[in-house]
Structures are given as C-alpha cells and as structure tokens.
Amino acid sequence: MSYCLNPSCPNPQNTNSEKFCLSCGSKLLLKQRYRAMKPIGQGGFSRTFLARDEDKPSLPNCVIKQFYPQAQGTSTLPKAIELFNQEAMRLDELGKHRQIPELLAYFTQDDRQYLVQEFIDGLNLAQELNQNGVYNETQIQQLLNELLRILQFCHQKQVIHRDIKPENIIRRQNPLKMRGQIVLVDFGASKVVTQTSIHQTGTSIGTPEYVAPEQMRGKALFASDIYSLAVTCIHLLTARSPFDLYDINNDVWLWRNYLKVSINDNLGRILDKMLATTPARRYQTVDDVLTDLNSLPTLISHSGTVTKPVQTSSNPIPSPMISSSPSQIDQELEEMKTIFMKGNKSHNKSHNKSHNPSNNSINNNSSNPPDPSTQQSAKNSRIDDELEELRAKYQNNNNNNS
C-alpha cells in the first residue's frame, strides 16, 4: 500500500501503483523516490512512516519523518522547528556510526519539512521486554558495553542525546547471531554542547520517567545521558515503571526490591553510581563508567557470546554515598558557607556600587546610610544559624537510617 502524507487527507490509503492520492490529489512520492507505506509513530512535533526508496533496484526500506507539530500556532512552534532541524543536523554528523541511523535526505516539499533516514529492522527494548521478559545480569552488562560506546562517540562530538529510554534503543535483526546489534535512535531531543551553552539553562526536554533531575531543570549534562541509561537498565531488570522504583520521600532508589533475577554486587554499585540524583556524585564521563564496568568478571551469555575481553580486578567498585558521616557533613556545609559568603560579597559590591552617591542622585538626600560591615555581620550570623539547622537535620536523618 501507499500512504498519503497530507495530514488533512480523508482517505490516505492508496495502491502502490499510484503517483497521486486518489482522495486529495497530493503527491505520493517525495523527491520522486520515497514512498510512504504506513504510519509507525507520532510524537509531539512529527509523524513517522515506514517507506521505501523506489530510486534503487532493491526498493530498500527507509523511514520518513514529517514535521507535524501538534501545538501549531503557539509559542512552542519555533522550538519545535528548531528541534526538527537539529535532529537532521545531528544525524548528518553522527549517522556514519554503524549504530546510529544514517540521514538519507532532508528537504521541504509542498510547504512541509521532511527528513528521511535509515530503517533499523528490529525490536526496540521496550518491545523486547514485553516479548521476552526481564533482562538478566549478562544482558545488562552487554547492553551497557554497547550503549556506553555509542554515547562515548556522541559525547566526543559534543552531543548530549537527552532522551535515552527503551523505546529509543533498537536491536537490529541479524540472522547470523542470536542477538543483534544495538542502535541508538531518535536524536530529536539532542543538544550540542558549547563552552557557553553548558552553563546556560535551556529547555526542559526528555521523557519524565527516564530524565535526570538537572535535565528537568533545563541543565542537561553529559552525565544526564549516563543517568537515563541506568534508569533504562533497572527498568529492563524489573519490568516496573521507574516511578515505582524511586522513593521520592527519602530520595533513594528501591530497584533492588523489585529484582526478579540476582545481579552481581559490583554491577549493582555501578548502576547506583550512574543513578545518583546529584550530578556531582554520579559518573561524570562514559569513560569513567567503562573503567569500572571493565573491572567486572567476563560474562558469557546463553548464546556463547563473550561480553568483553577484560581483566578481572580484585578491587571492588566503591559504592556511592547514601548517607553522610559527620565529617562529610561538616565539609559539605563549609563548602555551602563559602558559596554563600562569596555570593554575599559580590552582592554587597554591586549593592554598594549602585548606592554610591556619584552613581545615584537619590542617595544625596540620605544623611545616615547603613553600615555595610554591620549588615555583613548580620548576614553571616544568619548563614551560621541556617547551616546549624541543616547539620541537625542531617544528623537526625543518619540516626534514623542507622
């Protein structure tokens, strides 16, 4: 069948021999070669179709993505256009990697934007989970090895994917192997990092169940992809929604409570560190994760495939901090105090400058301006009081946990 790409078409189904839609008269071939066959997905700003390239003798399958924002005419439209354009640019830059879809074409036809990309034949990991059940330790270790290396390539190109989840990871069918090759898809939410953008707050984007806390606040980091990959892994291990695996009241992951198969403690600690909600306590780079992952014993799958040729290390992977000791609390609070003090000093400088009589004529009528040193002393005292309250709360929490 041939499918009409006109969103307003009353009857988009056509035969393969037609060049124009029998219902609305729209062209059925894009660029005289790409024919949509059936819709396979729809997101917030695009529709996706399985298609074929009729310019080639073998008529290979491909994917057509049509820009089709659901919130047309609103303030979100410019952002949707930007993201669609960015996806084409990211695929053009990254698509030569064998585990990232290749961009085949990017163009406008009949006032609508399209991109055409390589079709990846296989199940995504959400479909695989539904079909085969939860993953075991070996499968998770293999998955991490493959995906971390894809992310390593992306991050070296200064690209943060920002939407890693089971639906965006496809296992390519390979008749020569029992398990195919992992492919990372959907770069519609990806972002290029620059020296200035890494410190700027941007758009909150991604799938809520899998997105890192800092990314929800518009501060995506390379470590944000690491977090989302770990959430993907614990979902595959438990078949439970990530929302069910996290205790928001105590700020702790409970994924081990829902495991249906046992996993190695060191692998569990790696996942825990990847899942740290505070970016500073999380792995900062993919290389750091791979270093710890490669210290695990080599695992062999049921198909006889060796996960990786590595040296086994006798040193256990350090577990991420769940609670803080008194000395650590004091150190962290001192660091907070330093930050506060710096903020107050810079604030006072700008405050004094803005109230300088030479800069502000209103101050000429003020005979007794407040003493800055007195104000600073009062602020310091308030900071000390607030830090003491925080110290007491931390100690109470640690006592309760123990």
Image (cartoon, rainbow, N blue to C red):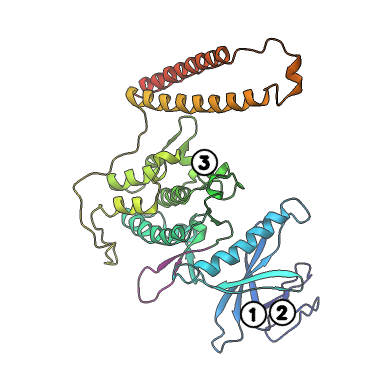
Q: Is residue 5 magenta?
A: no
Instruction: Please identify the quadrant where the N terminus is shown.
Output: bottom right
- What is the x, y in percent for residue 220? 53, 47
The vertical placement of 127 against 260, above or below, is below
Q: From mark 2 to mark 1, how far is it between C-alphas?
A: 8 Å
Q: Disc 3 marks which amino acid?
A: Pro
**Disc sitting over residue 188 in the figure:** none
Drawn side of residue 296 relative to residue 355, left or right: left
User: Do labels 2 and 1 touch, CB within 8 Å?
Assistant: no
Q: Is residue 174 magenta?
A: yes
Q: Residue furthest bottom?
A: 57
> Residue at point 68% right, 22% down?
355
Q: What stretch of residues is rendered in magenta?
A: 171-185
Q: Which residue is mark 3?
A: 213
**Disc sitting over residue 34 in the figure:** 1
User: Do labels 2 and 3 touch, CB within 8 Å?
Assistant: no
Discs 2/3, front: 3
Is residue 300 something that shows in the picture? Answer: yes
Q: From mark 1 to mark 3, how far is it between C-alphas?
A: 40 Å
Q: Disc 2 marks which amino acid?
A: Leu
> Residue at point 54% right, 81% down?
60
Upstream in sequence: badge 1 or badge 3: 1
Upstream in sequence: badge 2 or badge 3: 2
Q: Residue furthest left?
A: 314
Drawn side of residue 296 relative to residue 144, left or right: left
- Secondary structure type for disc 2: loop
- Secondary structure type for disc 3: helix
Q: Residue furthest top?
A: 368
Instruction: Please identify the quadrant where the C terminus is shown.
Output: top left
> Residue at point 36% right, 20% down?
399
